[in-house]
Image (spheres, helix red, strand yellow):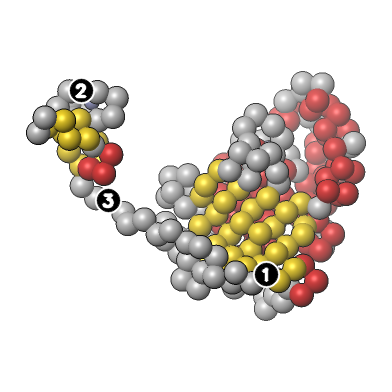
Amino acid sequence: MSVVNSQNIRIEHLTHISEEELKTAQEFHGHKCPAMPQGLRAGHLAMDILGVSRARGGGELQAIVEIGDHHFSGCFADGVQSGTGCTFGKGNITKKPLGKFALTLIDTATQRAVRVTAKYERMKLCLDMPFFTLRKEGIPPFKLDAAVVDPLIDDVVHREWQEMFDVREFQQYPVDKPGEAFDAVECAGCKEMVVTPYAKDFMGQEYCQIC
Ligand SMILES: [Zn+2]
Ligand SMILES: [Zn+2]
């Protein structure tokens, strides 16, 4: 697996986040914050480097987000989902519980991949700003004054990517491509529907894993 670092990254066409895209993503996410747009930016950057567009089905792109649960990098993943079209429902996004602002995006057709990580120095600056001090005091993001949140969002949307992210590019990234199942059985116990690969045979009858 050969690797190219940030300094040698070539981008044919750099896309930008429109007001409309930002608004749609904020509606999906539920509030205004800087981490969600950072995920949007990371997603756009990864797609621009790979030269691919937003995923429509579940097969063309795969995303890995190295976030965890219950901390401020969670919002980043919603930006990634909105920006790349890699979503929990389509099954083309995976969470690795590492507590980082990092996205790996894989183009399954070419097996090229890009890993985008937020630069530590910049993140450190952000964490000392009023938005985060107020959040640490327990104020939910949707109760914060627009004057505190909006300039941060504007900065995240418009700043040069080189100042925000480190990037590594991989050739021949390992890809597993599971097929899609379209058949289901009725569980002999609870009578609920179970997608066939998840059903277990017991004494000649199909059961869900709970039963
Ligand atoms: Zn958020
Ligand atoms: Zn059952």
Residues at circles 1 and 2 in contact by the CB criterion of under 8 Å? no
Q: Is residue 109 left or right of residue 25?
A: left
Q: Which mark is residue 86?
A: none
Q: Quadrant of residue 141?
A: top right
Name the residue rendered at 20%, 23% in the picture.
Answer: 190
Mark 3 to mark 1 CA distance (whole Å): 34 Å
> Marks 3 and 1: which is nearer the front?
1
Q: Is residue 3 above or below residue 69?
A: below
Q: Is residue 17 above or below residue 186?
A: below
Residue 53 seen from this side: no
Report crowding for label 3: few under 14, some 14 to 19, many 20 or more residues within 10 A (C-alpha): few
N-terminal of the two: label 1 or label 2? 1
Quadrant of the snapshot with the C terminus: top left
Q: Position of residue 71 (x, y in %)?
A: 69, 32
- What residue did someone put label 1 on? 3
Element at label 3: loop
Element at label 2: loop
N-terminal of the two: label 3 or label 1? 1
Q: Position of residue 21 (x, y in %)?
A: 62, 54
Q: Quadrant of residue 205?
A: top left
> Marks 1 and 2: which is nearer the front?
1
Q: Is mark 3 within 8 Å of ligand 2?
A: no
Q: Which mark is residue 190?
A: 2
Quadrant of the snapshot with the N terminus: bottom right
Name the residue type under label 3.
Ala
- What residue did someone put label 3 on? 181
Looking at the picture, tell me which residue is in the foreground, 91 or 44: 91
Element at label 1: strand
Name the residue type under label 2.
Cys
Name the residue rendered at 82%, 33% in the picture.
Answer: 132
Q: Position of residue 173 (x, y in %)?
A: 55, 65
Name the residue rendered at 80%, 56% in the picture.
Answer: 164
